[in-house]
Amino acid sequence: HGGQDIFGTPIINPPQVAILGMGRVRSEPVVVDDSRIEIQRRLNLVLSYDHRL
């Protein structure tokens, strides 16, 4: 929305094997029960991990 990124990809630093990145909390319209729209808070999570383990 508006060309702004809401999350990125976290980079693993040795000796880490995984890292969890969190985006920003935002409010957005969501369809509920196929009949109504309400505003809910959303947060994106991004997990990066070393697949060689």
Image: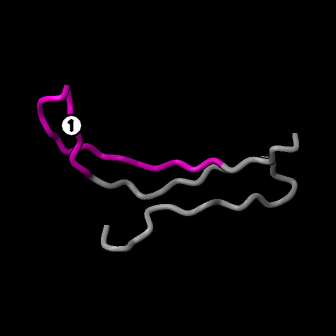
Residue most extreme to the front: 34
Quarter of the image where the C terminus is located: top right
Q: How many marks?
A: 1
Residue at x-position 58% and y-position 54% = 21
Instruction: Give the percent coordinates (x, y) of residue 13.
Output: 80, 61
Residue most extreme to the bottom: 3
What residue does disc 1 label?
A: 31
Task: Report the front residue among 46 and 35.
Answer: 35
Instruction: Give the percent coordinates (x, y) of residue 6.
Output: 43, 63
Residue at x-position 63% and y-position 47% = 47
Graded by Cα atoms within 10 Å as few (under 14), some (14 to 19) or many (20 or more), the crowding at tag 1 reads few
Instruction: Give the percent coordinates (x, y) of residue 48.
Output: 69, 50
Vertical side of 38 occupied by 21: above or below: below
29 inside magenta stretch: yes
Q: How is the image coloured?
A: one colour
Amino acid type at circle 1 is Val
Instruction: Give the percent coordinates (x, y) of residue 37.
Output: 14, 39
Relative to 10, 39 lies left or right: left
SS class of the residue under badge 1? strand
Quarter of the image where the N terminus is located: bottom left
Residue most extreme to the top: 33
Q: Which residues are magenta?
A: 28-47
Residue at x-position 44% and y-position 68% = 5
Residue at x-position 55% and y-position 63% = 8
Name the dominant secondary structure of the magenta segment.
strand
